[in-house]
Amino acid sequence: MDASYSTVSSFFTQTFGLTIKVLGDHAGSDELVTRGSLREGDLLGLYLDADRLVAALLVGQSDETETRLKGLIEQRAVVDSGLFTAHSRELGEALPR
């Protein structure tokens, strides 16, 4: 399905001093790619469906990153998972424009 979303659902919880946010609907995803570490309080997971971003898991991410991800989920943007997981890249370079 290539259609975009008109609204991105979101959920958050706070536990053990961490705020965990979930954006979008990961139920139909076929791949999860991550960067960062939950232990370090800086984790970002992208749920993909045929390389298209359908949901994200955020821990310790900025409001700017959250807003950008919501826009990318709305668009069902294509994500290069290899580029995203290449930790030598800045996050801004690893996400589609």
Image (tube, rainbow, N blue to C red):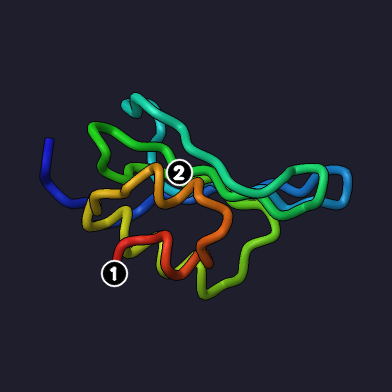
66 vs 89, nearest the viewer: 89
Q: Residue at x 40, y 43 (%)?
A: 82
Q: Which residue is mark 1?
A: 97
Q: Which residue is mark 2?
A: 46
Q: Quadrant of residue 42?
A: bottom right
Q: Quadrant of residue 71?
A: bottom left
Q: Tell me if label 2 and label 1 are in contact, CB under 8 Å.
A: no
Q: Residue at x 27, y 56 (%)?
A: 74
**Looking at this rendering, what residue extends furthest in the right direction?**
16
Residue type pointed to by label 1 = Arg
Q: Residue at x 45, y 51 (%)?
A: 84
42 with respect to 1 (left or right):
right
Q: Is residue 11 above or below residue 67?
A: above
8 with respect to 88 (left or right):
left
The x and y percentages for residue 23 are: 46, 49
Q: Quadrant of residue 57?
A: top right
Circle 2: element type: strand
The x and y percentages for residue 45 are: 53, 43
Q: Crowdedness of circle 1 by 10 Å Cα count: few (<14), some, many (20+)?
A: few
Q: CA distance from mark 2 to mark 1?
A: 15 Å
